[in-house]
Amino acid sequence: KAGVTQTPRYLIKTRGQQVTLSCSPISGHRSVSWYQQTPGQGLQFLFEYFSETQRNKGNFPGRFSGRQFSNSRSEMNVSTLELGDSALYLCASRGSNEKLFFGSGTQLSVL
Amino acid sequence: DAKTTQPPSMDCAEGRAANLPCNHSTISGNEYVYWYRQIHSQGPQYIIHGLKNNETNEMASLIITEDRKSSTLILPHATLRDTAVYYCIVRISGGYQKVTFGTGTKLQVIP
């Protein structure tokens, strides 16, 4: 099976812009979760989607949003980018026994 | 907030066993302990998980104390490729949770 695919791998934006990141889960996995990773904060949970519905959300402002499509692919959007949004954004799909399978991430730099 | 506590860093000599501790004193009866590791700039990789019994697979062993308030991940013969950040998390089976990985333990395997 192909692994979790995230695109793009790298992204450079300027403050005030918005960005959309994409995640394709492992075939057959219906749950997709998103995480933000920064050097000081570690891996922080953003949200989780299952069957096109957001099931849980972390403590992030409303500028961070997501959605899931009928084929389980997911996108996350960050609007009005701030310098502090620079981070590695990871998505994971959930398999049997609640194991998480992560993609390689999107490295976002906000200038 | 993370429900686990790990030391920020550890060193281990190549070929020796690496023992990585994790405290999860508020773990609930239906929460499992999961371990992941992240090699620089890649997504985290699942290692092992357990509920209350000790577990072993091809990568590692997991020892959970009888009161379940702490656990230890054991890499029996550490190699340079085991240098990574190791995360311990707790989560229930099924359902949707805000799983936060925290900052983990940076394991440095020394030649």
Image (spheres, coloured by chain):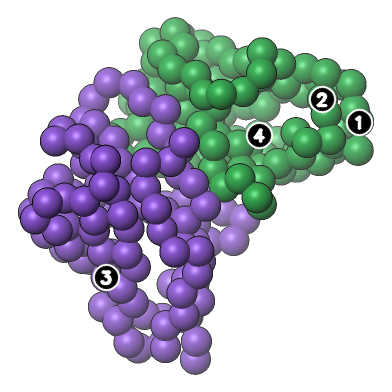
Q: Is residue A97 visible?
A: no
Q: Is residue A71 above or below residue B73?
A: above
Alpha carbons under labels 2 and 3: distance apart: 41 Å
Which quarter of the figure has residue A108?
top right
Residue carrying label 4? A7
Alpha carbons under labels 2 and 4: distance apart: 18 Å
Q: Are marks 1 and 2 in contact (CB under 8 Å)?
A: yes
Q: Are marks 2 and 4 in contact (CB under 8 Å)?
A: no
Q: Is residue B88 above or below residue A44?
A: below
Q: Nearer the viewer, residue B19 or A70?
A: B19
- Kindly give the residue lying farthest to the front in the view shown: B25
Residue carrying label 1? A14
Using residue B73 as the reference point, say whether residue A27 is left or right of it: right
Query: Residue A84: x percent and y percent?
Result: 78, 36
Q: Which chain is green?
A: A
Which dot, 4 or 1, sits closer to the camera? Answer: 1
Query: Residue A75: x percent and y percent?
Result: 60, 20
Sequence-wise first label, 4 or 1: 4
Which dot, 4 or 3, sits closer to the camera? Answer: 3
Question: Mark 1 vs mark 3: same chain?
Answer: no
Kindly identify the amino acid type of the residue bearing the numbered disc 1: Thr
Question: Callout 1: few (<14), some (14-19), or many (20+) C-alpha neighbours within 10 Å?
Answer: some
Q: Nearer the viewer, residue A83 or A97?
A: A83
Query: Residue B46: x percent and y percent?
Result: 35, 51
Alpha carbons under labels 4 and 3: distance apart: 34 Å
Q: Chain letter for mark 3, please.
A: B
Q: Chain letter for mark 4, please.
A: A
Using residue A65 as the reference point, say whether residue B43 is left or right of it: left
Determine the secondary structure under disc 2: loop
